[in-house]
Image (cartoon, rainbow, N blue to C red):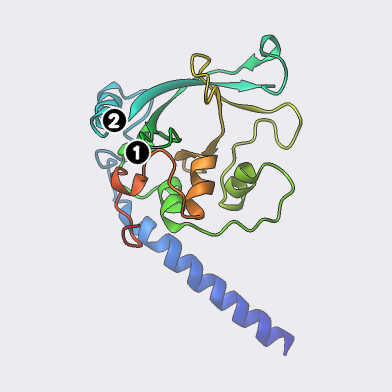
């Protein structure tokens, strides 16, 4: 009886995995990546990055350049700047001033990304976490916004000239696609921050418009 139950659960898991991941796998063609795919839009490709920046602005966003910092829960002079930077498209609501940040390549690609699928799917927050709910929800979805793991130091994507979101919690998925953690968390509850990304992500919603 127990073996039968385990076998049934395994079949359900396999069916779920095929339904979720097979469409994404089929979209990856042999040869060069398609234009607009995450592989083509990165910090080293100035041409596609420029297109992504223009796309962001044309759709009402603002391009934010942010650097990663560790130890942001301490006083600012003790923050540790890490290497590199990422560009985000920031959308701000004219109605309530709320914001959502989406990394430029995630916004601009017309291919599936884990961050876009997570935003569209609106998976309910499990609530099984005693920490920051946005960070917990990001982890629940298979991403991470933690710098150095679970600790008291903190960290995030910083733009010191931004007094509202100086330190951004960005949920980064294994395919490097990224949307801010609070934007994802509010959206699963049916609350749109900044702008409904259903209207601006180039990869269309496979579940139907929100």
Residue 52 image label: 2
Quadrant, the C terminus: bottom left
Horizontal and vertical percent position of residue 207: 36, 62
**How far apart in space, not on screen, are marks 2 and 1 (Cα)?**
8 Å
In this view, 19 is above or below 7: above
Q: Which residue is drawn at the image coordinates 53% and 15% (left, top)?
A: 160
Which residue is painted at 47% across and 57% down in the image?
122
Residue 186: image tag: none
Q: Which numbered disc flags the more N-terminal residue, 2 or 1? A: 2
Q: Which residue lies furthest to the front in this view?
A: 95
The residue that appears at 62% across and 42% down in the rendered structure is 135
In the rendered image, which quarter contains the N terminus? bottom right
Q: Which of 150 and 160 is in front in this view?
A: 160
Closest to the observer: 79 or 75? 75
**Position of residue 46 in the picture relative to residue 78 (left or right):** left
Q: Which residue is drawn at 49% across and 42% down?
A: 183
As drawn, the residue found furthest toward the top would be 77
Q: Which residue bears the numbered disc 1?
A: 107
Query: Residue 182, located in which quarter of the rendered image?
Result: top right
Q: What is the number of callouts on the image?
A: 2
Circle 1: element type? helix
Question: Residue 116, how many percent across, how many down?
Answer: 40, 48
Is residue 172 among the parts visible in the rendering? no
Image coordinates for residue 121, horizontal then vertical, percent: 44, 58
**Residue 83 found in image quarter:** top right
- Is residue 152 shown above or below 26? above
Q: Are marks 2 and 1 in contact (CB under 8 Å)?
A: yes
Neighbourhood count class around disc 2 (C-alpha, 10 Å): few under 14, some 14–19, many 20 upward: many
Q: Where is residue 9 in the image (x, y as percent from the top left)?
A: 61, 77
């Amino acid at each position: 009886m127990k073996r039968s139950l385990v076998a049934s659960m395994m079949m359900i898991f396999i069916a779920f995995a095929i339904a979720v991941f097979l469409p994404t796998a089929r979209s990856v063609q042999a040869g060069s990546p398609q234009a607009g795919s995450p592989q083509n839009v990165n910090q080293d490709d100035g041409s596609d990055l420029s297109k992504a920046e223009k796309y962001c602005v044309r759709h009402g966003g603002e391009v934010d350049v942010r650097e990663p910092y560790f130890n942001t829960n301490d006083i600012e002079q003790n923050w540790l700047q890490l290497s590199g930077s990422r560009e985000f498209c920031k959308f701000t609501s004219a109605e309530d001033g709320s914001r959502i940040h989406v990394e430029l390549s995630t916004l601009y690609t017309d291919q599936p990304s884990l961050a876009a699928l997570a935003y569209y799917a609106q998976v309910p927050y499990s609530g099984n976490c005693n920490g920051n709910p946005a960070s917990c929800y990001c982890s629940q979805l298979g991403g991470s916004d933690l710098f150095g793991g679970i600790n008291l130091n903190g960290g995030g994507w910083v733009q010191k000239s931004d007094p509202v979101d100086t330190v951004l919690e960005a949920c980064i998925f294994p395919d490097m696609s990224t949307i801010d953690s609070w934007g994802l968390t509010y959206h699963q509850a049916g609350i749109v921050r900044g702008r409904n990304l259903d209207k601006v992500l180039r990869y269309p919603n496979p579940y139907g418009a929100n």
